[in-house]
Each structure stands twice: as structure tokens, then as C-alpha cells.
Amino acid sequence: LTQATRGRSGLARTATSLSCHLEERAHAARAAAGLKAGLSHAPNMDGKERFVFFSLPHIAISSEGAVGQIQRPGREELSSACGALVGALKQFQSDKSSMDAHGEGSHDVADPEFTILKQRLAERIRSEGQDVDKMDLVDMTNLAQRAITADLETMIAATVDTVKQDYAVVTGVHIHSWGSAACGNATLEWIAPASIYVVTNGKRTSIDISVRRRQVVHW
Amino acid sequence: LTQATRGRSGLARTATSLSCHLEERAHAARAAAGLKAGLSHAPNMDGKERFVFFSLPHIAISSEGAVGQIQRPGREELSSACGALVGALKQFQSDKSSMDAHGEGSHDVADPEFTILKQRLAERIRSEGQDVDKMDLVDMTNLAQRAITADLETMIAATVDTVKQDYAVVTGVHIHSWGSAACGNATLEWIAPASIYVVTNGKRTSIDISVRRRQVVHW
């Protein structure tokens, strides 16, 4: 793990403001029209457009080590992160038929985001040959990270023109480690990196964050 | 119109950071699970939870008065806002069958947000008895505002418990009036208010922004 930031500043803050819910993240990665619209707003005064794509499902690991639990500021009780992944995993494990509730291209009108997310997760669980009963929240979060990254890269291939556009991709899992009042209300944010790379003039260069760990920690 | 802010600070900035694309706004208003999750994160240390819901589709009116056109910072050419509404209106007017491309509860897997948005707009155009050929972007934006506000209020009724939760609703249209370099690159942001009210202890009180215009302008 790389500690990206303390006190909700820096990279983790950017990631949080970009997308607070995994549903939105999953959507962003599959919404061609929205992605194209966003790309068309980038500065282009020197003839090149440049983007950074972040793909960061989130999970909480409390200061006491509890997976999925977060002490949100001003809240008395613990709550969950990611709530959507916790909910999907619970539904899948308690009722297998919920994995087939919606086929590709169909959704619940009152709940489009969550139903499309569940459909996508169920599809990925099958294509990876996972046994959902043996999965915990960490497994589900990592699976979501792989699914979102795959969708993001598909969308980039469909929308980005590397002749006139350069871009970077930052994927991983955003980890909230927020402490209770008893632990001094620490609000540590971490990124567990998956793949980080830039594509300039069509040439891909990987960035190995582990080499720079010391530097990043000293932010 | 009420000038909410200059230089991208204040209310308009909050609105922008909350939701940059109309698709997201439309989604937020219909996503029960996501809304409930958001509400469950609010501070509750004094026993009450409090929320402010914003519903603000956006439109550009350039400093030269061109409707739908925006000079984005660092971009050479003009672009559109709201791009999704411009696109939906163009599709509906050039091909009426595009209004029926997706029934309720179905979407294009590669483009869930835009197809669900179009379905919702087509439904609203019909229920209001509008003639889409006579609509311009201002009509479409106002229709979107009414649709989103109606959906938001439906979702609030389905998720908020007024015994332990107070809330405010701010609806309207967010107007970007961004100038070209020739006009000094002004970046004025306006809100055309629709309805603004608070509900405390289950009692609704309207707020008449027009009375406070002078005060707001002097922010």
C-alpha cells in the first residue's frame, strides 16, 4: 500500500471528488456518450488534448482493522464502504437468483445504477469462474476493480485518438482508514495501486509506484 | 435570474461539483439505493439528519447571447452545454423513432446513461403533450428541469423520514455565461430558480429568492 495522502488532501481527495459511489464509477466506465463529452472539454490550445483516467473502487478498513467499516465524521455509528458492494455481495450470497435478476441491457427503473452494477458484477464473477459463496468484501472489491478497469480500457480504446490525445490511467483501490474518536479520529486515505501508466504519442510507459514509495510517503 | 456567484465560487460551484452531467443528475433523482446510501452518511450527533438536494440541469448562454454555446477554458472552439440535451433534442427532431428506441427498464449496454436519459425525456415530452419539433434548447432544458424535479421529489418521498430528517430542495437551471477572450473571458454562473424550500419537522416553508435578489447579488 502506498499512503497517498493524509487529512483528505492530494490524490485521494481528487479520487473522492471525482466519484463517490462505485455505481457512478462503473457507469462512467461504460458510458460512451458521457466519456466522449468529457474528453471534448479538455484544453487543446497547443493542439493536443490530455486526460487522466482514475478507476478506484473504494473500501473501508477501520483503524481497529474491521474490513468494510468506516466512522464517518459526525456519525454516531459505523457505516459501510463500499455500501453498494457490501449490498451486492450480501444479496448474491443469500439468494443466488439475484445474480440473474436483470439481463444485459435491462434495469429496475427505480434503481438503474444499483441494478446495472449488480448485473455487471454477476457477469464478471461468472467470467472469472469465481464461487460467490467463498468471496469476502476484499475479493469483491478487487473483482470490481478488475471489471471497472477492463471497462475503462475498452471505453478508452473506443473513444481516444492517440494521434491527437495523450492520457494516463491510474487504477487501484481507494482505502479509507478512518478512526473513531477513541483513536483520535484519524482520517487516513490510501491507494492500493493496480496499474499506472501513461500513453503519449501512442506509446505506453508503465509507472512503478513501488519504486517511489518513499517519495510518495513524504508528500 | 439571480446571479449566484462570480468567478466560479459559491452556490454555482457547489452545483457544478455535485453533478457535471445531466445524465448523472437524472440518474441521481431515480436511484433509490444510491440516494439512501448518501442519506445514511449525514451527521446525526444531535439526533437529526439534514440534507440539501440540488436539482440543476445546465445550459450555456455565451457572453454574445448564443444559446447552448460555451467557451470552455483552454479550448479553442466553442462547445455545447448541456451536450446531452443538445444531442437528445437533435436526435428526436431528426428521427422520431429515436424517442422509442428504448422502453422503460431497457438501455444500451455501451451507453446506459444517455439511453436512459433519452427514454425519460421522451416520456416527459409525451406526458406534457409537447410537440418536439417546436422545442428549442431552452424548452428542452426547462422540461428536463421539471422531469428531474418531479423524480427527485418522488425519491425524497420514498426515502426521507421527516420525523428524524430535515431537508431543503433547491431546483432550477444552472446557466453558464462564459465569455470569449475578446470579451475578457468572463466566467459568470447564474441560477434561474424554480422552487426553493425547506422541510423541517415535516413542515414545508418556501423561500422566495426574488425578495433577496439584492442581497444575493452582493455576495
Image (tube, coloured by chain):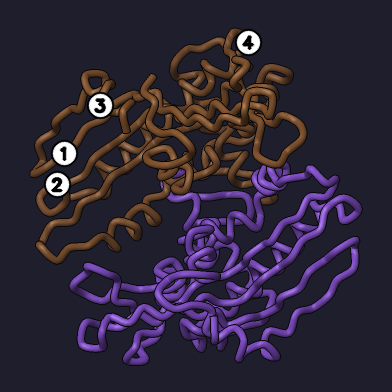
Chain colours: A brown, B purple
Which residue corresponds to the image point at 55% horizontal and 36% vertical from the top-left? A117
Vertical arrangement, residue B186 with respect to residue A186, above or below:
below
Please give the chain letter of the residue carrying mark 1: A
Q: Nearer the viewer, mark 3 or mark 1?
A: 3
Instruction: For label 3, count other residues whose C-alpha is less than 10 Å away and answer few (under 14), some (14-19) or many (20+).
Output: few
Q: Nearer the viewer, mark 2 or mark 1?
A: 1
Numbered tag placed on residue A199 in the rendering: 1
Which residue in the protein does label 4 denote?
Answer: A133
Q: Are marks 1 and 4 in contact (CB under 8 Å)?
A: no
Which residue corresponds to the image point at 26% horizontal and 76% vertical from the top-left? B78
Q: CA distance from mark 4 to mark 2?
A: 42 Å
Amino acid type of the residue that numbered disc 3 sits on in the rendered structure: Gln
**Marked residue nearer the N-terminal end (3 or 2):** 2
Report helix, strand or loop for mark 3.
helix
Vertical arrangement, residue B27 with respect to residue A72, above or below:
below
**Marked residue nearer the N-terminal end (2 or 1):** 2
Which residue in the protein does label 3 denote?
Answer: A215
Which residue corresponds to the image point at 73% horizontal and 84% vertical from the top-left? B208
Report helix, strand or loop for mark 1.
strand
Amino acid type of the residue that numbered disc 2 sits on in the rendered structure: Thr
Q: Position of residue B60 (x, y in %)?
A: 41, 79
